[in-house]
Image (tube, rainbow, N blue to C red):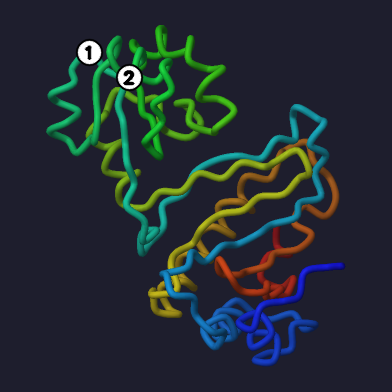
Amino acid sequence: MPAKPSKRYRSAVQAADLTKDYGLKDAIEVLSKFPKAKFDETVELSFRLGVDPAQGDQMVRGTTPLPNGSGKKVRVIVFTDNAQAALDAGADVAGLQELMAKITEGWLEFDVAIATTEAMKQVRTLARVLGPKGLMPNPKSGTVTDDIAAGIKAVKAGRVEFKMDKAANIGVGVGKRSFTPAQIVENAAAVIEAIGKAKPASFKGQYIKTVVISSSQSPGVRLASTEYNKF
């Protein structure tokens, strides 16, 4: 038998007409009326794209800063020969050989890894460990940089990375339930804009098919196509 929806979920369904499409501001207003969990839930945008994931030239990925931050404490490590400078700039852990050995032994207590260009020559050997978990430094996401201080600041301030999965879907956190509706609107608009601009040049057709906003334990609220059909 299918699982019975929770009391919180049933209450959320009663709070709004989930068969409708909403403008961004209205969708977030609807979301704010849903019952809250006992923890500060993450608010997420879920995109279904029309691109073909099997085509290498149709991969969609990138980063964007969130105007109001992510609301999440981001643990950052830096692969560099100048560990002290990275620590002074706000890195939680920094180093090279010892840090690589620690990760090889199974330590993965971090959210973002940054590397200098020189360090990447050695860090590439960790691709099989970090790659599948989405933790591998990458120039396209701004995590391979020689301006370590700027890289750390951007990540800590709430820059988010997005990457399409094998089913042409993208999920991106845009804040917390404790944020004001206006803060979530600004963050969500920034993510929609960034993913819209990441449209592959070779793709022809409907790029963004649907966008849904939800929190960790709420049903999804579907956005009206007017919020993204310009892309």
Q: Position of residue 139 (x, y in %)?
A: 46, 26
Q: Position of residue 207 (x, y in %)?
A: 77, 52
> Residue shown at 68%/45% (left/top)?
199
Name the residue nearer the viewer: 62 or 70: 70
Residue type beneath disc 2? Thr
Q: Badges 1 and 2: C-beta atoms under 8 Å apart?
A: yes
* Direction from residue 218 to residue 71 in the image, left or right: left
Classify residue 24 by image quadrant. Answer: bottom right
The quadrant in which the C terminus is found is: bottom right
Q: Element at badge 2? A: loop
Q: Element at badge 1? A: loop
68 vs 195: above or below: below
- Total number of numbered discs in the rendering: 2
Classify residue 155 by image quadrant. Answer: top left
Q: Earlier in the sequence, mark 1 or mark 2?
A: 1
Q: Which mark is residue 219?
A: none
**Mark 2 surroundings: few (<14), some (14-19) or many (≥20) residues within 10 A:** many
Q: Which residue is mark 2?
A: 116
Q: Position of residue 223 (x, y in %)?
A: 69, 73
194 vs 185: above or below: above
> Residue shown at 30%/26% (left/top)?
78
* Direction from residue 225 to residue 146 in the image, left or right: left
Q: Which residue is mark 1?
A: 81
> Residue shown at 59%/60% (left/top)?
192
* Direction from residue 203 to residue 151 in the image, left or right: left
